[in-house]
Structure formats: C-alpha cells, structure tokens
Amino acid sequence: MGDADADFSSRPSSARIYDALLGGNHNFEADREAAKRLLSMIPAAGEMARANRAFLNRAVQFLLDAGVRQFLDIGSGIPTVGNVHEIAQRRVPEARVVYIDIDPVAVAHAGEILADNPRATVVQADMRFPEAILEHPGVRRLIDLDQPVGLLLVAMLHFVPEDDAFVAVDRLREALPAGSYIVISHGVSETAADSELEGITALYRRTDVSAASGRTRAEIMRFFGDTELVPPGLVWVHEWPDGPQDKTGPADMAVVAAIGRKP
C-alpha cells in the first residue's frame, strides 16, 4: 500500500472488506475492522465470501468448457489469488478478462497486478452507468461484443439500489450476443441473516456503496431476463452445480447463485 492510498485508508470499501474476509492483504485497518463488525453480525460471512470465490472458480471453468473466451467481471474487487484471469488463462492462455470496480484503490492495485498481462485489464467505473462500461476503450480493446461474453456479477448486485440494478443489468444483458452467459451470486432475503439487515446496511453506508440488502429469489430471477438458466437453476451458492461443496448449511449461507445463457 503506497502513499497514493492515504486518502482512502480511513474509509472502508466493499472490495477491500471482501478481500479481508478472504484473508487477503490488499486492505487497510478500517477494512479489517469493518470485516470484524460484519463477522460479529453474520458469523458465516467469511464462509460466504469463500463460497462465492469457489463458485466464481466453478463458473469460469463451466464457461470455458462452453467455449467462452472473454470475461467481463463487474464489481470484481481486487484480482488476487484465484481470480478470473488466473483461472481462465491457466487453461486458455488467450482468454481475455476485463475487471470493473468502483473503488479507486482496488483498481490501482489491480492495475499493478495486471501490468504485464496484455489480455487482462481493469477499469474504474460504476455499473449504474452501463453505457460508460460498454463504450470504455479498455473494455472495447479486449471484449468483442460480436462473440460470446461471460458477464460476471458475483456477490455485488446486493450493493446496488433496486431501480439502478435492474435497469443496468437489463442494458448489459441486452448488449451481449447470443451464446453469452450471465453469472450471478446474490444475498437472499429469506434467511436468519435478515435480522441483521439494519446493522449491515449501516456498516456499508460508510463505504463506497449506497446499499447492502438481499433480494428475494423472484427479484434475483429478474436479473436473468430471457436467458435460459443452466441446471440446476438458482440454488445456494455452495450447491452450484452438483450439490453441497462443503458442510456449510443454507441457514449459514444466505447467498444464492445461478448462470443463464442468452439464446
């Protein structure tokens, strides 16, 4: 962490809190304190973060098997160990990845990590303005919208307010060509964690995001539009696609996930 980060070190960010939950080292004391407070409200938050990361790995592998060679990861956080470019390019060196995040510190560190990788880049942008993402030179350089794209929205849409989220995802989904996939994991508002919603919302209000709330399964399904859900459909994040990947139960998870294919 360099001097350029000084202005941001006292204010936690959603990306760096996530990094702290994963045990990463791209975070500040304020982020670690916020992560501790989150864990006090939701003791399974660390397991949820790791389950999301494991789902991301499985989803990218699935998309590679389906022939996808370019990935747009929105709300990506900091691309450290186990992120999309590592997973994809290990198997398919020519795979192209664009990370999008709103946090300038996350983007700065991602830029350092990706400096020598010509097939991966990071762009600072707000997903509430999808046209700015789709038209960004960094995105256009690596993402060909005439070829299938893997749109990754993993553990981030619950940070975007209702109207903004649905409108933005609709526009992004519409921009994708046939054969593309949309990958979503999302906090679901049907679990014991709901009782802590007020405290969680207050915690994230101090960060770079303006909301932190789950949605019902029906609301989450709206994001997939007319895409065809890949079996088994919308399930607990640690159960996609073959059932439980570990011993963490649904009551502890509070996150669901699915993948849709654009016909």
Image: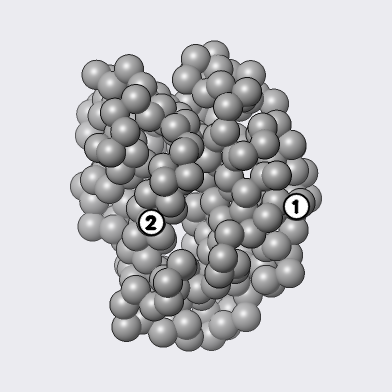
Task: Name the residue located 34 percent from the left edge and 60 percent from the top edge.
Answer: 54
Vertical relation: 112 (above or below) 231:
above
- Badge 1 element: loop
Residue 20, percent across and down? 29, 55
Proximity of marks 2 and 1: CB atoms separated by less than 8 Å: no
Q: Quadrant of residue 171?
A: top right
Q: Which residue is mark 2?
A: 58
Instruction: Using residue 28 as the reference point, say whether residue 188 is left or right of it.
Output: right
Q: Earlier in the sequence, mark 2 or mark 1?
A: 2
Q: Is residue 170 visible?
A: yes
Q: Give the quadrant of the C terminus.
A: top right
Q: Nearer the viewer, residue 254 or 226?
A: 226
Vertical relation: 254 (above or below) 5:
below
Q: Nearer the viewer, residue 170 or 113?
A: 170
Task: Name the residue located 33 percent from the left edge and 68 percent from the top edge.
Answer: 46
Residue 161, percent across and down? 69, 53
Q: Quadrant of residue 180?
A: top right
Q: Amino acid at mark 1?
A: Gly
Residue 99, percent across and down? 44, 33
Vertical relation: 67 (above or below) 244:
above
Instruction: Using residue 214 as the reference point, say whether residue 257 is left or right of it.
Output: left
Residue 238, percent across and down? 41, 71
Q: Which residue is mark 1?
A: 225
